[in-house]
């Protein structure tokens, strides 16, 4: 595949997936109210028309075929109005559309994976056609044999022209063989002409409501009657854009015998006459172009950019930040005289300002709302509600949170697994069990997202039955996967057992769970992008999964501190205060741990040199510096040797081979390259609190 075709394929996949996502959101929203709005009917028709056209252009026959049949269905619904369908038909239409969306998405996935598309879509197409027949009253189509014989008996088209006194000419149109529902397809073509404001009549009349006209159209086609040749010529141009037309011909109405000699002259003039009216449509064309031109800035305001190019841009911006730091911290600057140094620093400050703007723009280019992933979970919950017979609502919080595009791609599967886990395991099977516990009969799953300065936090919480650590330990013991006596496991360790491969609490294997795979895959996928996953649960109250994923590459303001010969960087956003203390200010709790009082609160002290085993001469608290740090609902004080100063740093994840050491669990969030070329460890305050004070 050449670059041009590859670019077209990328555009096709992006647009088609976007349209299918839009379709899914629309169906889920409409099913909740049990009704399609007229706007949504029109939108679904347009979506299918677009997919049909682009798929046909790319020669993806199965996709184009299914989209075309759905387009026919919604053409009829759009023409007759959604209110013409009964409640049972609407319910059936929802299920049919969900399955159609899945079918189209399955074919698109095959295109993405380079697999051959399905060639036989007749059974599904027939199902769509059968539903269209049902709602159009054509389910029991009778065979009009006498009409067929009469039609077939006419050898000449001119002898069977409809009786239209004012018609000057007819367009005789024949449809392709075996397409089915010929009367509705002919009526779609007629409507396409009417939308262009052409004045004409059509025969057989009432074809849209009379299924018996199918036989007439199959045998003898259908007729369009025009009062002028100019109108017929314009209609011919439109017919060229319509589908399922085998052939068509312009038939002039015969005149009386005395004028027969003039007829050839009129016939020869038909071509110039057809060309003559072309300026008339062109008069309207500039207006249409003008309207398009007025909207063109909106259409051109968005472009698709290859993600690899954005990666390269962000990497270069990161290197610029590092290089700028190297230049401004160069020891040669000390050799400049005062005036030269001041001039240099003035230019350096201007460079810093421009660099800040550049990095903000570069980072924002990769940021996309997480709503796309969240909205897809509506479909997961909807399908499982029906199959598990559970009444559950999905609540979305923070769906406007913007995250890096690579993160969106990496967290979709883990979130889906956890939502399915909450539906299957978390929410009670028996409604009476919820009522007896004083809960709302309808279960709830809350999917929320937020971000801090350098990580995205996503939580999936349910108000179900929760997890019993004792039962988890018992199940793990039966499977022989405990690594120490059960009584030595903490509650958090016991809950973490569900992340082990092969662990499942289901007694039987179902469509959704019971095989012992899923949560271990979630943990592996999250850790592969440098993230972590944790869970908390209370019996009878529910379970909450929390995913924390750092940005793959971000630029932040950090405070450099020294501990012995090591340099650490702490995000400025997490620092509340720095101060020195005297020995009299140190307080000890009942376990002998050191604490300090600040503004009416007591905060534990974490000595970094003890936590990481670093040799340093500064071991007395009064000799070093305390940093009061906080994140989320946790706050404590870090003891370090000294402060170096604030600096903007590029946050880079550790190489993949270090993932096995689970550095995140020890409060290490990443690293950065300093201006002098040295590497500084970036501390993750939240996980540092867990490592030092929660003994994880």
Image (cartoon, rainbow, N blue to C red):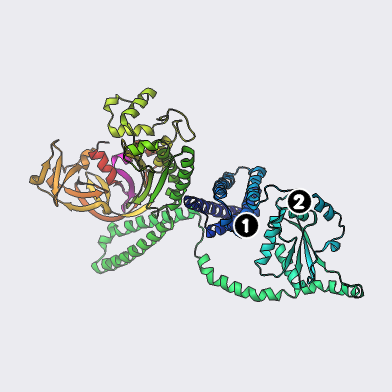
Asked whether 380 falls inside the magenta stretch, the response is no
Instruction: Name which residue lies at 31% across and 64% down.
Output: 348
Q: Which residue is mark 1?
A: 75
Q: Does residue 10 appear in the picture of this structure?
A: yes
User: Where the C terminus falls, by quadrant?
Assistant: top left
Q: Is residue 549 above or below residue 229?
A: above
Report the magenta residues as a range. 664-681
Q: Which residue is mark 2?
A: 177
Inter-mark Cα distance, 1 to 2: 21 Å
Circle 2 — which element? loop
In magenta stretch: residue 673: yes
Of mark 1 and mark 2, the one earlier in the sequence is: 1
Q: How many marks?
A: 2
Looking at the rendered image, the disc whose residue lies closer to the viewer, 1 or 2, is 1
Tell which of 25 and 146 is nearer to you: 146
| Callout 1 crowding tier (Cα within 10 Å): few <14, some 14–19, many ≥20 | many
Left or right: where 392 falls relative to 87? left
- Residue 528 percent coordinates (x, y): 41, 41
x then y, percent, for residue 572: 26, 54
């Amino acid at each position: 595949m050449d670059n041009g075709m590859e670019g077209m394929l990328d555009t096709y996949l992006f647009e088609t997936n976007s349209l299918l996502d839009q379709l899914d959101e629309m169906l889920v929203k409409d099913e909740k109210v049990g009704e399609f709005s007229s706007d949504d009917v029109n939108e679904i028709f347009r979506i299918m028309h677009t997919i049909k056209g682009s798929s046909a252009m790319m020669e993806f026959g199965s996709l184009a075929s299914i989209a075309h049949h759905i387009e026919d269905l919604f053409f009829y619904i759009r023409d007759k109005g959604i209110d013409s369908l009964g409640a049972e038909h609407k319910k059936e239409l929802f299920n049919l559309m969900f399955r159609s969306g899945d079918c189209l998405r399955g074919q698109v996935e095959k295109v993405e994976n380079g697999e051959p598309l399905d060639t036989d879509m007749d059974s599904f197409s027939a199902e769509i056609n059968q539903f269209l027949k049902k709602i159009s009253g054509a389910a029991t189509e009778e065979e009009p044999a006498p009409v067929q014989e009469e039609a077939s008996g006419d050898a000449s088209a001119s002898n069977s022209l409809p009786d239209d006194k004012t018609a000057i000419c007819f367009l005789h149109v024949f449809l392709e063989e075996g397409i089915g529902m010929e009367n509705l397809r002919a009526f779609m073509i007629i409507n396409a002409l009417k939308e262009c404001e052409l004045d004409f009549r059509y025969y057989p009349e009432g074809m849209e409501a009379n299924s018996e006209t199918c036989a007439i159209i199959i045998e003898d086609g259908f007729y369009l009657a025009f009062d002028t040749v100019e109108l017929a010529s314009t209609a011919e141009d439109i017919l060229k854009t319509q589908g399922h037309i085998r052939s068509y011909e312009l038939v002039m109405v015969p005149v009386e015998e005395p004028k027969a000699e003039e007829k050839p002259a009129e016939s020869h003039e038909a071509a110039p006459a057809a060309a003559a009216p072309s300026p008339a449509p062109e008069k309207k064309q500039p207006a249409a172009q003008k309207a398009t031109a007025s909207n063109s800035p909106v259409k051109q305001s968005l472009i698709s950019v290859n993600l690899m190019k954005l990666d390269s841009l962000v990497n270069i911006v990161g290197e610029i930040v590092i290089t700028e730091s190297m230049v401004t911290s160069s020891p040669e600057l000390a050799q400049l005289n005062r005036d030269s140094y001041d001039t240099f620093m003035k230019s350096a400050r201007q460079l810093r300002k421009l660099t800040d703007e550049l990095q903000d723009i570069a980072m924002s280019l990769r940021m996309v709302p997480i709503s796309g992933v969240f909205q897809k979970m509506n479909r997961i919950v909807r399908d499982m509600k029906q199959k598990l017979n559970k009444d559950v609502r999905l609540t979305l919080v923070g769906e406007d949170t913007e995250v890096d595009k690579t993160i969106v791609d990496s967290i979709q599967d883990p979130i889906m697994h956890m939502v399915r886990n909450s539906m299957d395991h978390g929410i009670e099977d028996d409604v009476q069990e919820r009522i007896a516990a004083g809960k709302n009969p309808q279960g709830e799953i809350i999917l929320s997202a937020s971000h801090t300065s350098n990580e995205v936090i996503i939580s999936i919480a349910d108000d179900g039955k929760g997890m019993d650590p004792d039962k988890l330990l018992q199940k793990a013991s039966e499977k022989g996967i405990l690594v120490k006596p059960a009584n030595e496991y903490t509650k958090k360790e016991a809950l973490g057992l569900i992340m082990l491969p092969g662990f499942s609490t289901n007694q039987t294997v179902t469509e959704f769970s019971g095989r012992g795979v899923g949560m271990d895959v979630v943990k592996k996928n999250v850790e592969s992008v440098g993230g972590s996953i944790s869970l908390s649960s209370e019996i009878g109250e529910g379970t909450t999964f929390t995913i924390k994923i750092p940005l793959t590459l971000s630029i932040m303001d950090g405070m450099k501190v020294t501990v012995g010969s090591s340099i650490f960087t702490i995000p400025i956003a997490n620092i509340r205060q720095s101060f020195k203390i005297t020995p009299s200010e140190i307080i000890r709790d009942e376990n002998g741990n050191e604490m300090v009082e600040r503004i009416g609160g007591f905060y534990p002290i974490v000595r970094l040199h003890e936590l990481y085993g670093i040799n340093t001469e500064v071991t007395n608290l009064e000799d070093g510096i305390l940093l009061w740090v906080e994140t989320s609902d946790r706050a404590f004080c870090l003891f370090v040797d000294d402060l170096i100063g604030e600096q903007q740093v590029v946050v880079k994840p550790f190489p993949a081979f270090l993932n096995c050491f689970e550095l995140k669990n020890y409060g290490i969030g990443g690293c950065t390259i300093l201006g002098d070329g040295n590497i500084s460890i970036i501390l993750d305050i939240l996980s540092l609190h867990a490592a030092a004070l929660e003994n994880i």
